[in-house]
Image (cartoon, grey):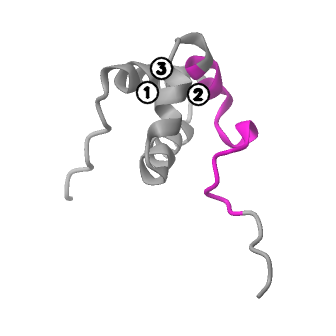
């Protein structure tokens, strides 16, 4: 059986996280650890939420909100049905 290759959803490498999120996680004690405790699906959702912002200030604000939610143990709200 062939060896599995790298997976795009593997968040073990720092460069896969948006720089704004890396900075925000590094600025708050315990935030990075809490992020790593999340399920892969929840980590991917936070990363997607930060990355999809078009403006730098929006990405920075979302990264800061991510840290706040992680430390308060609040998950992202589910998208509403359209």
The percent coordinates of residue 33 (x first, y second) are: 53, 27
State the CA–CA distance, disc 2 to disc 3: 10 Å
Say if 60 sits above or below 1 in the image.
Answer: above
The percent coordinates of residue 27 (x first, y second) are: 58, 11
- Residue annotated with mark 2: 21
Q: Is residue 19 magenta?
A: yes
Question: What residue appears at the point 42 percent right and 46 percent down from the top-left corner?
Answer: 42
Q: Answer yes or no: do the residues labelled 2 and 1 have beta carbons within 8 Å?
A: yes
- Residue annotated with mark 1: 66
SS class of the residue under badge 2? Answer: helix
Say if 70 sits above or below 17 in the image.
Answer: above
**Which of these two is toward me, 30 or 26?**
30
**Which of these two is toward me, 51 or 7?**
7
State the CA–CA distance, disc 3 to disc 1: 9 Å
Which badge, 2 or 1, comes first in the chain's sequence?
2
Farthest front residue in view: 1
- Residue annotated with mark 3: 61
Residue stretch in magenta: 7-25
The percent coordinates of residue 6 (x first, y second) are: 75, 63
SS class of the residue under badge 3? Answer: helix
The label shown at residue 35 is none
């Amino acid at each position: 059986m062939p060896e599995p290759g790298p997976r795009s959803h593997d968040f073990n490498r720092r460069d896969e996280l948006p720089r704004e999120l890396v900075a925000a996680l590094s600025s708050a004690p315990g935030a990075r650890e809490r992020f790593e405790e999340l399920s892969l699906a929840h980590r991917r959702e936070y990363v997607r939420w930060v990355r999809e912002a078009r403006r730098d200030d929006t990405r920075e604000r979302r990264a800061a909100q991510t840290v706040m939610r992680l430390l308060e143990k609040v998950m992202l709200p589910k998208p509403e049905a359209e």
